[in-house]
Amino acid sequence: MVTIDRILVPIDFSSYSKEALQYAVPFARKFKAELILLHVVEPAIYPADFNFGQVGIPSIEDELRSKAVDELNKLADKETKRRARSSIMVRVGKPFIEIITTAKEENIDLIIMATHGHSGIEQILFGSTAERVVRKAHCPVLTVRSREMPEITVSQKKKIKADKGKKK
């Protein structure tokens, strides 16, 4: 029999990721599993000048991490209180890498995540975080498509890519 003890829910604070969390709570209750809410802060790297290359700005990352902890605690309290056990984690890095790494390190049994987030046009051109997690995660991934998300057709994707190519 399949046991699900730990469920990872990546949160980028978009309405889509919050909807995925709402979907994850009944799973956690059904399996008596713990929900782990994960937010990934992307590194703040800015070009300094041509002599020194890129420069990281740790103070911005620290501030973003602190704010993420506060917001995750509020979200966990609001969405999971008395309905499911939960904990929070904040990591710094590329979201899909950190999600996959966290899942492995934390012995996650299931990842429940939104199909879309804050990535916008980048997702259409380069593939989504969810797509990369589905392909590379060691455990099953349940993706939640938002009821608000408009359908993007293949021809629309091709047009967007073609338009981007013309701008170069």
Image (cartoon, rainbow, N blue to C red):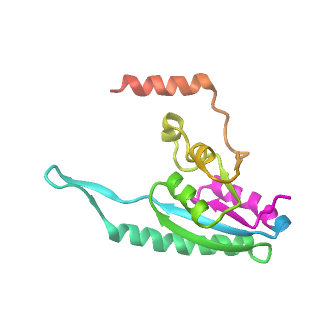
Range of the magenta residues? 1-28
What percent of the width, then of the height, locates residue 26? Answer: 81, 63
- Outermost residue, front direction? 1
147 or 61, nearer to the observer: 61
Write the residue at 65% across / 61% down: 9
Above or below 34: residue 20: above
66 or 93, nearer to the observer: 93
| 55 on left or right of 164 | left
Above or below 120: residue 125: above
What percent of the width, then of the height, locates residue 13? Answer: 58, 60
Judge whether residue 25 is colored magenta.
Answer: yes
The quarter of the rendered structure image containing the C terminus is top left
| 104 on left or right of 55 | right
Q: How many marks?
A: 0
- Outermost residue, bottom direction? 82
What percent of the width, then of the height, locates residue 114? Answer: 65, 50
Q: Quadrant of residue 108?
A: bottom right
Above or below 124: residue 110: below
Write the residue at 57% across / 65% down: 105
Write the residue at 13% across / 52% down: 51
| 107 on left or right of 44 | right
Q: Quadrant of residue 63?
A: bottom left
What percent of the width, then of the height, locates residue 112? Answer: 69, 55
Write the residue at 67% across / 42% down: 149
Judge whether residue 152 is colored magenta.
Answer: no
97 or 11, nearer to the observer: 97
The quarter of the rendered structure image containing the N terminus is bottom right
Q: Quadrant of residue 153?
A: top right
| 83 on left or right of 115 | right
